[in-house]
Amino acid sequence: MANYPEKVYLNGEILDAQEAKISVFDRGFLFGDGIYEVMLRIKGSFFYGAEHLQRLAKCLEKINIEFDVSCLPNTIDLLLKASNLELQDCLLYIQVTRGVAPRKHSFPNSTVPTLMLYAMPFVLPELNDKPISVVTTRDFRWHRCDIKMTSLLGNVMANDVAIKAGHYETVFYRDGKVTEASHSNIFFVKDSTVYTHPANEHILNGITREIVIELCHKNDIAVKEKAVWREDIVKMDEAFLTGTSTQIASIQKIDDHYFYQGSAPGLVTQKLQKLFLQLKNSYECEKLI
Ligand code: PMP
């Protein structure tokens, strides 16, 4: 099965992927009632793995799924061994749903959460140096985009529009302000100051977004967590997307507006891409959580 993982961890067992089955009454299946995480293992450690697990724990708490993430490092070790990925760069997917219960909207009194993980080989390019083009659309999602939930229909629908039209991403705006993109956060640069939407309920606070803000602070790059008006996009000097697998991707074109021609992104974007690469190369994580 190309593009599928070989092994899946499901509720205490490591199975061949095609053997991993869940109940049709799982609330993850019926309602998208679950939380997920994606992180990358680079040269033997999970890049900001502790932060990813903390976000998972926080999101589970936000939707009242009782699940202790401290069991995960052990499970992840077992999965990596079974998948023969201990020594390879790979992507780890984790999903926790509320579990199985008769179909009813209200939260069931006591269910055992469904836990599913898989890992597959995944090698990041050193730098994401492809200039990308994106389109904008009204943010038609709900008002709790801070929750990394499995019900991604709004994001999926928006992303599909971009992909079908040959673009990399769809960027959302809400009440006239640019929020984020369908699977990444967005930053702008104006007069050497970096801007991104504040981490509130209208965006997912990306781990990469947080890393970029920290890189700005540590390297004397002015940064403001302040949303940019959609109508002001054309006045910006640079724009880029961030995400775990996107890393820092320079936006060349947004709708009909070009930030630059040719292949070289703006100077601030280039600087942050280099700083991000240095961080990756020097990163060592002691413990996953
Ligand atoms: N926003 C959305 C909607 C996302 O799905 C993602 C994750 N792909 C991000 C932002 C970026 O988050 P991270 O940097 O943690 O991957």
Image (tube, rainbow, N blue to C red):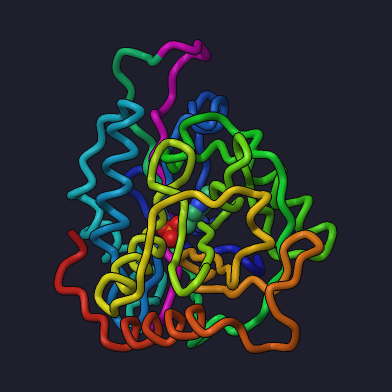
- Residue 225's place in the image compared with 175, above or below, is below
Q: Nearer the viewer, residue 43 or 154?
A: 154
- Residue 156 appears in the picture as rendered: yes
Give the residues drawn in magenta, as a range: 88-106
Q: Residue furthest right?
A: 165
Q: Quadrant of residue 138?
A: top right
Name the residue rendered at 32%, 36% in the picture: 60
- Residue 94 appears in the picture as rendered: no
- Residue 40's place in the image compared with 106, above or below, is below
Name the residue rendered at 72%, 63% in the picture: 254
The N terminus appears in which quarter of the rendering?
A: bottom right
Residue 234 appears at what percent x and percent y? 69, 62
Residue 9 appears at what percent x and percent y? 39, 53
Q: Quadrant of residue 135?
A: bottom right
Residue 272 appears at what percent x and percent y? 43, 79
- Residue 96's place in the image compared with 100, above or below, is below
- Residue 198's place in the image compared with 27, above or below, is below
For residue 258, side relative to residue 109 (left or right): right
**How many discs mark residues in the rendered view?**
0
The C terminus appears in which quarter of the rendering?
A: bottom left
Residue 163 appears at what percent x and percent y? 77, 59
Q: Nearer the viewer, residue 239 or 130?
A: 239
Name the residue rendered at 29%, 81% in the picture: 44
Name the residue rendered at 46%, 56% in the picture: 196
